[in-house]
Amino acid sequence: MTTRKIGAVSLVVRDYDEAIAWYARCLDFVVLADTDLGGGKRWVLVAPAREAATPLLLAQAATPEQAACIGGQTGGRVFLFLHTDDFARDRSRMLAQGVNFLEAPRHEAYGMVAVFEDLYGNKWDLLQVK
């Protein structure tokens, strides 16, 4: 049997340090790796927890074409889904850190959810699955 998984999801950002600071402060993410690759490139992985299955690879835009995609990698659709075991706790903490929620929390068949934006305008779901 072959074991496969998605190792990371790349997210184009304007600046490594700006993105690290926002994800750490606003979403309480941890930095799993921050390695200088030379030439201004870094290997930066962040995640909600050390044991998270799929971290985000923060990829600083290196060309004007890449910079044009910041905040719009999915054409305005929700891009990432942050699962939580306590929706109210995490939403309150995020609001206190200035995270912009685009809607009030709503109950769906699959759980409690609300859409928020990251610092670049990428849309996320905060989701507590039933």
Image (spheres, rainbow, N blue to C red):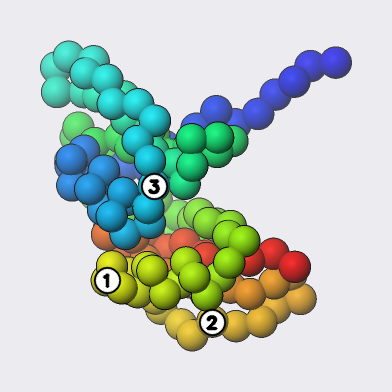
What is the CA distance from the residue labelled 3 to the residue labelled 1? 15 Å
Q: Earlier in the sequence, mark 2 or mark 1?
A: 1
- Disc on res. 98: 1
- Disc on res. 29: 3
Quadrant containing the C terminus in the rendered view: bottom right
Quadrant in the rendering for residue 62: top left
In the image, residue 110 lies at what x, y percent?
Answer: 74, 70
**What residue sits right under mark 2 in the picture?**
105
Badge 2 crowding class, 10 Å Cα cut-off, few under 14, some 14 to 19, many 20 or more, is: some
Quadrant in the rendering for residue 94: bottom left
Residue located at (23% from left, 48% from top): 21
Q: Secondary structure at mark 1?
A: loop
Q: Earlier in the sequence, mark 3 or mark 2?
A: 3
What is the CA distance from the residue labelled 3 to the residue labelled 2? 22 Å
Badge 3 crowding class, 10 Å Cα cut-off, few under 14, some 14 to 19, many 20 or more, is: some
Residue located at (28% from left, 26% from top): 34
What is the CA distance from the residue labelled 2 to the residue labelled 1? 16 Å
Horizontally, is 20 left or right of 84 in the view?
Answer: left
Which mark's residue is nearer the viewer, 3 or 2? 3
Contact, CB < 8 Å: mark 2 with mark 1? no
- Disc on res. 67: none
**In the image, what residue type sits under mark 2?**
Pro
| Residue 20 can be seen in this image | yes
| Residue 65 can be seen in this image | no
Residue located at (38% from left, 56% from top): 27
Q: Nearer the viewer, residue 2 or 47?
A: 47
**In the image, what residue type sits under mark 1?**
Gly
Q: Nearer the viewer, residue 30 or 45?
A: 30
